[in-house]
Amino acid sequence: MRDERILVTGGAGFVGSNLANYLADANEVVAVDDLHLGTPENLDPGVEFVEASALDDDWPADVDVVFHLAAHSSRSMLEENPQQGTRVNVEGTVNVIERVREHAEAVVYAGTSSIYDADLPARETDDVRAATCYEASMLARDRYMEYYNEFHDDVHVASTRFSSVYQGYGGNEAHKGEYANTVSQWAAEMADGERPVLWGDGTQTRDYVHVEDAVRAMEAVAEHRLEGSYNVGTGRNVSFNETVDLLNDALGTDVEPAYEPVPLRNYNYQQRFDVSKLREATGWEPRIDFEEGVESVCAPYVD
């Protein structure tokens, strides 16, 4: 993608800042963030930063492409404040599309993987359900996507359903703290000799996708002006126990995990994505395998 004027909402957050920095090399990029969870320190000097909410009406809307990552992006955030979380996730999405569709050709927003069940691999055609307030708000985004694609010809709206996106505290993930990916949290803990806490017996799995691959996927969806939902993962799942083993190998440690009962209802035990729809539509492929990604997460602790 080159010579576009691009808006990234949630642009100071983890995925948003990686995307904004990546695109700023060849485009004019504006990052909008209310700093609920993001920090402008994540952004490179070439990115214009505007402190604002997706619910506001005074951020720059005269753009060619929008990447909408502003969201309350975990189930705990929504359970703590379902009214505000729903406003941000649902009303904020509608507000963004309405404000930009006079100018923008494409809106690509962050979907969720937690709507899938444990029947692997997860495909975009699978039946999905809302078992939490967070999932309900994210599915509402999908319904509005369908509405805009059906009734409006002036903008293409697509969802990227991420699996488990990680980068590590050596990247732009540190500010997320307890909301960071487990790989990043465990690496920091294990480097300090702390035992990572695994829920259940550690056999649950995640399809870990590196943020660099997630960023390229969003770019590909926008470049092709796609509509609909697209899985973004690797097609491989790794158990929590295997993840700890890989972290020990990369860190040169021998830390045993601690096991605790799963404290959540409707917990997602298994995750693995079928990414063939995105591959066939754009040619995108994940480039960073998990072993390489773990090495990069752990590198700041061993250098």
Image (cartoon, grey):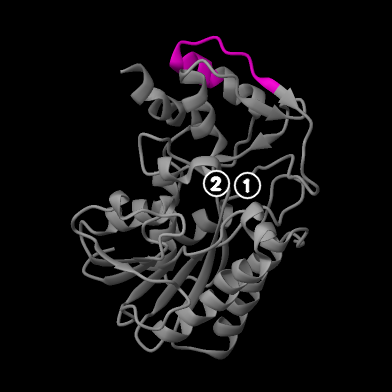
Q: Quadrant of residue 217?
A: bottom left
- For the point 38% across and 89% down, the residue is 102
| Quadrant in the rendering for residue 106 | bottom left
On the image, the x and y values in percent for residue 273 come to 63, 47
Q: Does the residue at mark 1 contact the one at mark 2 (Cβ under 8 Å)?
A: yes
Count neighbours of disc 2 (C-alpha within 10 A) and say few if under 14, some if 14 to 19, many if 20 or more: many
Q: CA distance from mark 1 to mark 2?
A: 6 Å
Q: Measuring 54% from the left and 45% from the top, which residue is drawn there? A: 179
Q: In screen coordinates, is 250 left or right of 40?
A: right
Residue 249 is tagged as: none
Task: Note whether residue 206 is visible.
Answer: yes
Range of the magenta residues?
Answer: 246-258
Front residue of this view, candidates 234 and 78: 78
Decide: is 213 above or below 32: above
Chain-order first, disc 1 or disc 2: 2
User: Quadrant where the N terminus lies?
Assistant: bottom left
Q: Which residue is mark 2?
A: 233
Name the amino acid, label 1.
Answer: Phe
* Amino acid found under the numbered disc labelled 2: Gly
Pinpoint residue 212: horizontal percent, then vertical percent: 39, 45
Check if residue 255 falls in the magenta segment. yes
The total of numbered circles placed on residues is 2
The residue at the point 76 percent across, 51 percent down is 117
Q: Which mark is residue 273?
A: 1
